Image: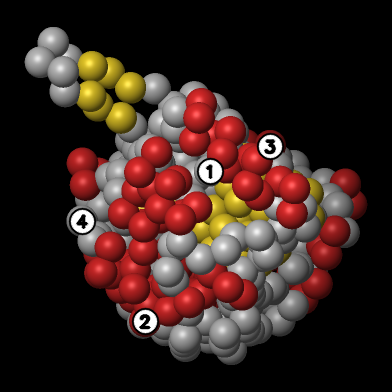
Amino acid sequence: MTIGSHLQEFHGLPAFTFPEAADEPLRVSALPSPESVAWRVAVDSYESEESWPDAFARFLDAVDTTRVRALIVGAWSDAYDNAPTEVIEALVAARDRLPELRAIFLPDIVMEECEISWIVQGDVSPVLDAFPLLEEFGVRGGNQLVFPVVHHERLRRLTVETGGMPAEAVRGVAGSDLPALVHLDLWLGTSEYGGDYEVADLEPFFAGSRLPALKHLALRNSEIQDVICSSLASAPVVARLEVLDVSMGVLTDDGATALLSGQPLTHLKALDLHHNYLSAAVRSRLLETLEPHGVKVDADQDDADSDEEEDGTVWRFVAVGE
């Protein structure tokens, strides 16, 4: 699976793409009200005649940004070569013009613009530092991603989508002080695309001590999904979750059985394991054990596929890699 479609909504608002320079003359009166949409600002990902900061400057001039609540950073030029340094600098410089901004996604780039593991990232923490009232932050791309330990009082939802999340970034998120965080979603990915994390790096998530408000935990899209599930089986954080998501990864009977053999999961509202490598017997056991208690279980195999070589070696794949 790859990411083939841009975000249709963000922060509960429909996404709206701010017109590109080539669409001039811009009819400001035809634009939606500033607070009614999540504004997507983007340029052509290949040989754009306009830089992203210039497009953002046009946006700032055309829209009453004092009322904007959600912003989606789209493609900048040659994202497979260029880090979003200028993009982040432009966002930070405009912080006083965006007093009501509560959500940022960086970046909404799809496969035709740049594959997820080719997106060159950087240090995204200046965005969190510049917007202390931010409630939702989304990041896509793990190549050169830097996420140091941060403190943020208001952030409620954090998503990091990668085909391979660097261990240092995992440890940065895990060590961050996020007292209001309710929803955490990490696409951990594979070592082939830079995911050099180990299960020990995830221990702070299992303990949950820095995330006292957490209700939705997604540690997914991982090549070590079985090991993660084995650790979650006795993790203190699980007892206070409403949703546990271990989908999109290389989950086999070993990991699912460990979950079922550990602490009770009957308090959950939902358990998501879609895209998995489970046998029919274990899939049935999950449903029979949890659904009578009102747990919504997604155990769909989805598009999980495997290859077997002549020597018997079996290759299994995460949902999103390259």
Secondary structure category for the residue under label 4:
loop
Q: What is the C-alpha distance between the residues marked 3 and 2?
A: 45 Å
Q: Is residue 242 left or right of residue 304?
A: right
The one of 238 and 121 positioned closer to us in this rendering: 238
Q: Return the residue at label 3.
A: 23
Give residue 293's mark.
none
Whether label 4 touches label 1, CB < 8 Å? no
Q: Which residue is drawn at 20% across and 56% down?
A: 196
Residue for badge 4:
196
Q: Where is residue 186 in the image (x, y as percent from the top left)?
A: 45, 58
Residue beneath label 2, please? 175
Lower position in the chain sequence, tag 4 or tag 1? 4
Instruction: Of the two numbered discs 1 and 3 on the same chain, state the one appearing first in sequence.
Output: 3
Of residues 258 and 135, the one drawn nearer to the viewer in this rendering: 258
Q: Residue at x 40, y 38 (%)?
A: 253
Packing grade of label 3 (10 A; few <14, some 14-19, many >=20) is few
Q: Which amino acid does label 2 sit on?
A: Gly
Observer-side mark, 3 or 2, equals 2
Label 3 SS: helix
x 42%, y 69%: residue: 234
Q: Position of residue 285 (x, y in %)?
A: 56, 39
Residue at the far top in the pictured view = 310
